[in-house]
């Protein structure tokens, strides 16, 4: 499908955890199979594939929006199998959406400071809300858990690009700029991660986790996506619609998945929200009006 291929650069603006861009599109005569590359999954930090499937759902929604914006009649049929989630196929009508390719291009994660204030009450119905300050202790505990785990930290390090000299700086992963790090902070993090295997037992995880302190110390809020475990692809589509609803109104998001990744903090957050099954917490991100623009994140060219 030549028409689809020509839109791939915009499909690829979809978000993915650690910016791994795990999706694959295998073109058939009439459409394309949406799958993923296991080399771009995060088996250690995302062992259940929750974030992988959320990201693939966000990718599917992005493809449908971009196709509709180009006037193409394309739909999606879930058809899970090994290394695949479904098929983009010819449809009778273009996908019905309020969003456009320009909206897809305009969205981005923003990890910088946010203005105090809450989102309008009815902007994202169905999503749970938590005051940032109520999450600060959970975030710190989750960061300690994450940086205390050598395998999780090693996997994260694989996807960090903390200097523009990194050979994949413009392609994928998380850059110093995307992480809103100053030059000194990026240098410090590189140095700390280089000595991590030696200093892990000497308290380095505590030093790394301390970097996130203060992030939630303002009058803002975080959004929590709750949904049935097993429906992550559909919920990823919903997540993309939520992010676009926000970004088209000037709001941005900063995911804090470590709170849900770590079982103790996931359970505490579920209790705080009155949610019975902690595994139904699928995603959490602070959201609001950012004080400054974030850099555009890298993508592998199509
Ligand atoms: C399912 C999912 C989980 C994510 N978790 C985190 C996270 O825990 N922390 C973070 O800073 N960004 C997180 N992100 C944001 C990605 O890192 C981001 O989408 C990616 O780097 C591409 O950047 P962009 O959103 O600006 O296009 C997540 C994104 C997705 C789709």
Image (cartoon, grey):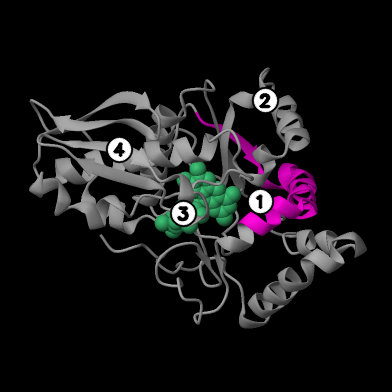
| N-terminal label among 1 and 3 | 3
Q: CA distance from mark 3 to mark 4?
A: 16 Å
Task: From the image, state whether disc 4 or disc 1 is nearer to you.
Answer: 4
| N-terminal label among 3 and 4 | 3
- Residue 144 placement (x, y as % from top left): 80, 52
Q: CA distance from mark 4 to mark 1?
A: 40 Å
Residue that carries the numbered disc 4 in the rendered image? 34
Which residue range is magenta in the image?
Answer: 127-155
In the foreground, 212 or 221:
212
Q: CA distance from mark 3 to mark 2?
A: 26 Å
Res 264 → quadrant: top right
Residue 278's tag is 2
Task: From the image, state whether disc 4 or disc 2 is nearer to you.
Answer: 4
In the foreground, 200 or 230:
200
Kindly state the secondary structure of the residue where label 3 is placed: loop
Residue 20's tag is 3
- Residue 35 placement (x, y as % from top left): 34, 38
| N-terminal label among 4 and 1 | 4
Residue 219's tag is 1
Was residue 129 drawn as part of the magenta stretch in this picture? yes
Q: Residues within 10 Å of mark 3 (few under 14, many from 20)?
A: many
Residue drawn at the location 11% of the way across and 27% of the way down: 91
Q: CA distance from mark 1 to mark 3?
A: 32 Å
Quadrant placement of the N terminus: top left
């Amino acid at each position: 499908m030549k028409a689809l291929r020509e839109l791939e650069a915009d499909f690829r603006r979809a978000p993915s955890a650690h910016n791994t861009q795990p999706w694959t599109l295998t073109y058939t005569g009439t459409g394309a199979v949406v799958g993923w590359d296991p080399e771009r999954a995060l088996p250690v930090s995302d062992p259940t594939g929750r974030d992988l499937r959320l990201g693939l759902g966000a990718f599917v929604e992005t493809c449908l929006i971009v196709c509709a914006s180009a006037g193409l009649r394309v739909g999606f049929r879930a058809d899970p199998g090994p290394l695949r989630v479904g098929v983009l196929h010819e449809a009778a009508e273009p996908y019905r959406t309020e969003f456009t390719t320009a909206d897809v291009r305009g969205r981005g994660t923003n990890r910088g400071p946010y203005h105090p204030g809450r989102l309008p009450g009815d902007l994202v119905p169905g999503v749970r809300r938590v005051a940032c300050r109520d999450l600060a202790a959970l975030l710190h505990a989750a960061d300690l858990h994450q940086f205390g785990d050598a395998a999780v930290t090693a996997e994260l390090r694989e996807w960090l690009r903390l200097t523009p000299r990194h050979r994949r700086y413009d392609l994928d992963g998380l850059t110093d700029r995307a992480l809103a790090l100053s030059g000194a902070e990026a240098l410090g993090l590189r140095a700390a991660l280089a000595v991590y295997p030696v200093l892990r037992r000497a308290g380095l995880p505590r030093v790394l986790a301390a970097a996130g302190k203060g992030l939630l110390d303002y009058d803002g809020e975080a959004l929590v996506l709750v949904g049935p475990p097993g429906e992550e692809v559909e919920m990823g589509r919903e997540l993309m619609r939520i992010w676009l609803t926000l970004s088209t109104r000037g709001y941005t998001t900063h995911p804090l998945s470590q709170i849900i990744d770590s079982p103790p903090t996931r359970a505490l957050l579920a209790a705080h929200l009155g949610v019975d099954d902690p595994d139904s917490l699928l995603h959490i991100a602070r959201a609001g009006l950012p004080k400054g623009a974030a850099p555009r994140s890298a993508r592998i060219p199509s």
